[in-house]
Image (cartoon, rainbow, N blue to C red):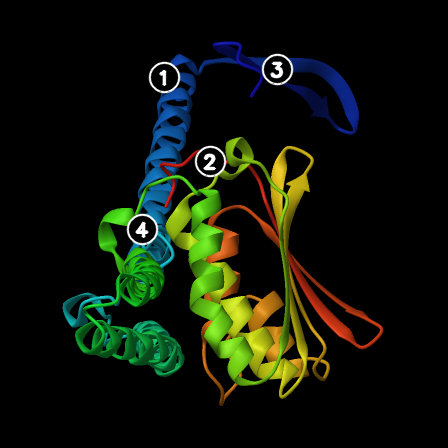
Amino acid sequence: MTGDPVLRVAAPLQFQGRTVGGIVTELDVTDLLAERRDVTLWLLFGNALATAVLAFGGWFAVARILRPVGALVQAMDASGGAPRPIPKAEIPHGDPGLARLIETYNRMTTAVEERAEAERRLADRERFVSLGRLSSSLAHEINNPLGGLLNAADTIRSYADRPDVVRQSAELMQRGLGHLRDVTRAILDQNRLDRAGLPLRPEDFEDLRLLFEPEAYGRGQKLDWRVAAGAALLAGQPAAPVRQVALNLLLNAGAAAGENGQVGLNVENDGDGLSISVSNTGAAMSEADLARLLASGPLPPGGGVGLRLVHDIVAGLGGRLHHDRIGDQTVIRVNLPVHGGDHA
């Protein structure tokens, strides 16, 4: 059918084997054409509707299947670095594969939380251990002036009638009390919470020296101390974390240097930032200690977390850590950019 509403059919008329004429028949097929057009439109409409229904049904089925995966992705994206578990009500128990995947993820988040809590407990433990080590050394440092003060007080009482002896004993007591004041102030500054947020000062390194010297001298170690950075550059760093980094590195260097070793601290300008180098003449650092200090992966078993605390603090300040073995010395260098004293 060509679309013409009139259909013509021609046939020859034969008689006794000869064609004597022709017959032409005309048919009006307007109704048939209209019916074909209607059928075609209905078929197109039906196919489009069926395709849309099937597409929507497929999308709905796939969305329903992937809903748990979407919840898993959302939980991981919204965690902010601390994965949160997915509630049991949202686990599709009808799909064993997805259910096992989400349960595995929940176990992983629990393990991460337990590990973070364990690291926090180890950090607190490491802090108390460091304080204990310092306290034992500082007790000796305080005890010696106290003995001298008691002797001076006894001398004044015994020779109260001799002004020259009283004056000498009073000067000795003044020097001893001044030393006790300096030691006490250094301990308080190291552990005061209200120091958080204050800028670094040259006095902070003097306090660290006062805290660390008894530890070094108790082992017969030589202490090489040099602070060449100016007050303006130091003020661009927060006091509390920088003091903690320096003290942890010094304690580890003192322990590594051993008896009659040498420990050094060098604080100087590093372009626009600050460079803190701590050295010791002890044995080279082990692979496990280097992993704690320089890497960000899981902590290897055994040992403390002092080096990892140094790594985390330096990373939080946007700084860099470097390790070098130069001759018989191990050198740990910390490079810190300028932050401003309010970043603790």
Question: Which label lies toward us, 3 or 4?
Answer: 4
Q: Is residue 245 left or right of residue 148?
A: right
SS state under label 4: loop
Mark 3 belongs to which amino acid?
Ile
Q: What amino acid does circle 2 point to?
A: Ala
Q: Exactly how many numbered labels are in the figure?
A: 4
Which numbered disc flags the more N-terminal residue, 2 or 1? 1
Residues 293 and 212: in front is 212
C-alpha gap between disc 2 and disc 1: 97 Å
User: Which circle, 2 or 4, is nearer the viewer?
Assistant: 2
**Can you tell which mark lies on residue 31?**
1
Q: Is mark 2 on a helix, strand or loop?
A: loop
Sequence-first disc among 3 and 1: 3
Instruction: Measure how far apart labels 2 and 4 are at the Cα level.
Output: 37 Å
Task: Please tell me which of labels 3 and 4 falls first in the chain.
Answer: 3
- Residue 180: horizontal and vertical position, in percent? 31, 65
Evaluate whether residue 108 shows in this view: no
- Furthest toward the right, the residue is 327
Whether residues under marks 3 and 4 lie with C-beta atoms below 8 angstroms apart, the answer is: no
Using the image as rendered, state which of residue 179 and residue 174 is in the foreground.
174
What residue did someone put label 3 on? 23
Which residue is at a point 30% across and 72% down the rendered structure image?
113
Res. 222 image quadrant = bottom right
Helix, strand or loop under label 3: strand
User: Between marks 3 and 4, how big is the CA–CA gap?
Assistant: 85 Å
Disc 3 from disc 2: Cα separation: 115 Å
In the rendered image, which quarter is residue 14 located in?
Answer: top right
Q: In this view, does 93 lie to the left or right of 278?
A: left
> Is label 3 in contact with label 1 (beta carbons under 8 Å)?
no
Mark 1 belongs to which amino acid? Answer: Asp
- Residue drawn at x 48%, y 47% as measured from the top left: 317
